[in-house]
Image: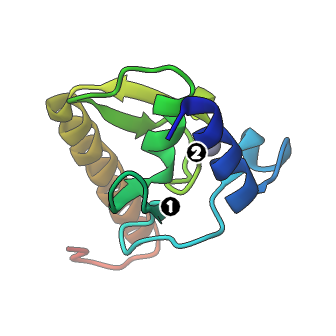
């Protein structure tokens, strides 16, 4: 599939919601268990694609061997301006930091509310 065809395909399949939610382009077709927008193309061969990765590729980024890290909170966003290409190691480390940040926020919340032992 050519780049402009992919961009047309992504646009035609998705609900673009400009401005609201920080300009995210939300994928409203199939979203997988991890929260990422997904679709399947059948030409030249059957392939399952992530909307955010294909969007970066179609917009001219070389994504081979790299992860596209969402700078916004929406995993199903495919706006290339909201994505940053990082190494797999960097992405894993960022994900761990995000989980740690969530854990800390939950812990602080439960301490404030007098709840002990959040796991
Ligand atoms: Zn976004």
Label disc, if present, on residue 72 of the rendered structure: none
Position of residue 106 relative to residue 87, above or below, is below
Q: Nearer the viewer, residue 118 or 41?
A: 41
Give the quarter of the image for residue 4.
top right
Instruction: Tell me the residue at 49%/70% (across/down).
Output: 31
Is disc 2 surrounded by few (<14), some (14 to 19) or many (20+) residues within 10 Å?
many
Circle 1 sits on which residue? Answer: 37
Position of 71 with respect to 24 (left or right) is: left
Is disc 1 surrounded by few (<14), some (14 to 19) or many (20+) residues within 10 Å?
many
Position of residue 35 relative to residue 84, above or below, is below
**What is the x, y in percent for residue 88?**
18, 34
**How far apart are labels 2 and 1 at the CA level?**
8 Å
Q: Which residue is most to the front?
A: 44
- Element class at badge 2: loop
Instruction: Tell me the residue at 61%/70% (across/down).
Output: 29
**What is the x, y in percent for residue 81?**
61, 27
Give the quarter of the image for residue 111.
bottom left
Q: Are marks 2 and 1 in contact (CB under 8 Å)?
A: yes
Position of residue 115 relative to residue 56, above or below, is below
**What is the x, y in percent for residue 94?**
28, 37
Q: Assess mark 2: CB under 8 A from ligand 1?
A: yes
């Amino acid at each position: 599939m050519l780049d402009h065809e992919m961009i047309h395909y992504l646009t035609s399949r998705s609900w673009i919601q400009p401005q609201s939610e920080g300009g995210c382009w939300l994928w409203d077709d199939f979203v997988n268990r991890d929260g990422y927008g997904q679709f399947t193309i059948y030409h030249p061969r059957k392939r399952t694609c992530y909307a955010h990765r294909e969007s970066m590729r179609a917009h001219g980024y070389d994504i081979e061997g790299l992860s596209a890290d969402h700078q916004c909170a929406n995993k199903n966003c495919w706006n290339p301006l909201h994505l940053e290409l990082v190494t797999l190691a960097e992405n894993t480390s960022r994900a761990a930091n995000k989980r740690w940040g969530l854990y800390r926020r939950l812990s602080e919340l439960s301490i404030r509310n007098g709840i002990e032992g959040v796991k």
